[in-house]
Amino acid sequence: MVRAAVLPSVGAPLEITEISLPEPGPGQVRVRLAAAGVCHSDLSLSDGTMRLPVPAVLGHEGAGTVLAVGEGVTHVAPGDGVVLNWAPACGTCHACSIGEVWLCDDALTGAGRVHAVAADGTELHPGLNVGAFAEETVVAANCVLPVPDGVPLTDAALLGCAVLTGYGAVHHSARVREGESVVVFGVGGVGLATLQSARIAGAGPIIAVDVSPEKEELARGAGATEYVVASDTTAREIRALTGKRGADVAIECVGRASTIRAAWDSTRRGGRTTVVGIGGKDQQVTFHALELFHWGRTLSGCVFGNSDPAADLPVLAEHIRAGRLDLSALVTEQIALDGIPAAFENMLAGKGGRALVVF
């Protein structure tokens, strides 16, 4: 039996309880978690914005140590440090065949399997495939990647979602070039990773936007050269900071209609607006036909940073070893499992960066 954070049903409070995990079968790996990040996607699962089978063990951004492997697993062994990959690519669907592994048709099929059993016998699913809000988890072998050399195991948890998403949004989706101006909406965990990645890309100015004035120091520490408190005049302020043109690139990390629209309005004519945040179906964004023609902007969605974890983790590790990427700077709070509900409340209130569950 291990302790875990279980979502009994959509909209219900998380329960910190004991669960029973099976031994790893063929093609599976058992991992003892070192740390797990509390991501907004976990909140989106709990409130029904994202729909996956419940009851479930939440948590998808994590790293830990391999305890045991099932038959046929050869790329990791007991004692290895691993990063959990919540969106493993099948390698055979159409998206994978054209190199768009982040859009794999089968990436989340594992979320429907029976992952564990609660003390009362209730069968539990793994939220987003990996069930990282637990002392231990059992996952498919393609859901683990070796931790790169020189990356502390606890910090490596952030590579599982926030950093891959933020880095990919800058380098894969928006394709930021040196000297381009970038504005990032939302200074949470992903937003902080996006700011650091824009700095790595050589962008400038780098403008952070958030509803909280208290996040300015956090944003500037991640690479922001300017800070704007969100308001009805945000787009006008962005244009004033970018030669009255607007930013070359706007990256939205919130998932609200109002911030998506503000990001679009803050982008220069011919610029790129990338939406990373996950919003609900009720968040409707409208554009009129003439503005689409006149502004000539590109508006694009961004799934998991358009990243290929197997290819991107070694690149991120090099940035970490060189001191260009600081994972610990994303974390504003270290908590235990019992602290996850409060971390959800802080996210809803717009407080802090990444909360990290440390086991």
Image (cartoon, rainbow, N blue to C red):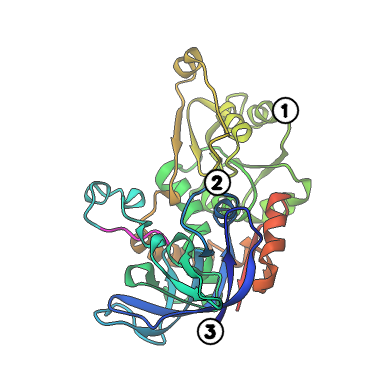
Q: x and y percent of residue 57 in the render? A: 52, 67
Mark closer to the chain start, 2 or 1 = 2
Q: Is residue 288 left or right of residue 85?
A: right
Tell me the residue that label 2 is attached to. 49
Disc 3 marks a residue whose amino acid type is Met
Residue 129 position (above or below residue 261) = below
User: Dot 3 lies on which element?
Assistant: loop
Q: Is residue 359 left or right of residue 197?
A: right
Q: Can see residue 22?
A: yes
Tell me the residue that label 1 is attached to. 232
- Residue at 61% over, 27% down: 243
Disc 1 marks a residue whose amino acid type is Asp
Q: Main secondary structure of the magenta part?
A: loop
Q: Is residue 77 left or right of residue 245?
A: left
Mark closer to the chain start, 2 or 3 = 3
Q: Can see residue 152?
A: no
Disc 2 marks a residue whose amino acid type is Thr
Q: CA distance from mark 2 to mark 3?
A: 30 Å
- Residue stretch in magenta: 86-90
